[in-house]
């Protein structure tokens, strides 16, 4: 049999044995991964072997010899029958897929620019490129506008006022709230030393002014 030239963008779904024996091949686009299958072509020898094997099981192995003989014939003829079916499948697939002149991958008609002989990865559509660039510009413009708005809002915050981010009573994070969301302790006022009333940092064990243990 003549040599068979083919690519790797296919899956062999053929079955050699059983009542469902036959040949079928699935090809796929190497750009978008859309798939196309050939029509199922029965493998009569394999199917006959499958039916006789089923009958032999039903009748307690009486047809065992015939089943084995048919199985041997099916195995012997499978490879040549598959090659013949595969050659036909390749010819069918040629009407569904095109080889890109740039990357040499096989792609479907949707992904192929027939005028340029290339897929849209190698020869992008100008209209698609324009729409993509416009969308990217829109995102960039919106991001810049949002940044400017954030700067305006940030200038309204009181950045000079000291804030307690942790409750001095229970150590819960307060995120600058005036009262602790866990225990209700007022956090806007710094704690004072019990001995000299000097302001001390939250969580300090000793007063930095007089050394009194807190």
Image (tube, helix red, strand yellow):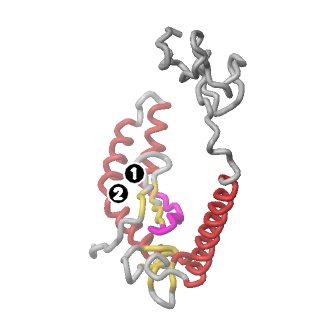
Q: Residue at x 36, y 52 (%)?
A: 74
Horizontal and vertical percent position of residue 38: 51, 66
Horizontal and vertical percent position of residue 34: 53, 65
Magenta stretch: residue 147 in it? no
**For residue 194, above or below residue 17:** above
Q: Which residues are magenta?
A: 29-43
Estimate how packed mark 2 is, as few (under 14), some (14 to 19) or many (20 or more) residues with alpha carbons within 10 Å.
some
Task: Report whether residue 121 is seen.
Answer: yes
Q: Are marks 1 and 2 in contact (CB under 8 Å)?
A: yes
Q: Is residue 111 left or right of residue 155?
A: left
Task: Report whether residue 44 is seen.
Answer: no
Q: Secondary structure at mark 2?
A: helix
Front in this rendered view, residue 132 or 182: 182
Looking at this rendering, what residue extends furthest in the bottom direction?
A: 115
Q: Residue at x 66, y 54 (%)?
A: 155
**For residue 11, above or below residue 112:** above
**For residue 99, above or below residue 167:** below
Horizontal and vertical percent position of residue 73: 33, 52
Q: Which residue is mark 2?
A: 78
Q: Which residue is mark 1?
A: 16
Q: Residue at x 38, y 83 (%)?
A: 101
Q: Quadrant of residue 130?
A: bottom right
Q: Quadrant of residue 14?
A: bottom left
């Amino acid at each position: 049999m003549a040599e068979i030239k083919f690519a790797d963008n296919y899956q062999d779904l053929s079955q050699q044995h059983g009542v469902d024996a036959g040949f079928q091949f699935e090809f796929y686009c190497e750009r978008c991964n859309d798939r196309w299958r050939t029509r199922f072509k029965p493998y009569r020898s394999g199917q006959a072997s499958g039916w006789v094997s089923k009958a032999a099981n039903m009748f307690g192995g009486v047809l065992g010899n015939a089943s084995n003989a048919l199985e041997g014939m099916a195995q012997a003829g499978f490879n040549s029958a598959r090659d013949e079916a595969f050659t036909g499948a390749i010819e069918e697939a040629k009407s569904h897929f095109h080889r890109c002149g740039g990357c040499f991958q096989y792609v479907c008609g949707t992904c192929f620019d027939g005028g340029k002989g290339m897929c849209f990865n190698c020869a992008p559509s100008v209209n698609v490129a324009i729409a993509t660039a416009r969308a990217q510009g829109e995102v960039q413009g919106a991001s810049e506008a949002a940044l400017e708005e954030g700067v305006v809002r940030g200038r309204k915050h009181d950045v000079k006022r000291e804030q307690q981010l942790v409750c001095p009573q229970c150590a819960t994070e307060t995120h600058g709230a005036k009262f602790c969301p866990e225990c209700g302790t007022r956090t806007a006022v710094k704690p004072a030393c019990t001995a000299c009333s000097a302001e001390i940092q939250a969580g300090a064990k000793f007063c930095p002014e007089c050394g009194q243990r807190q």
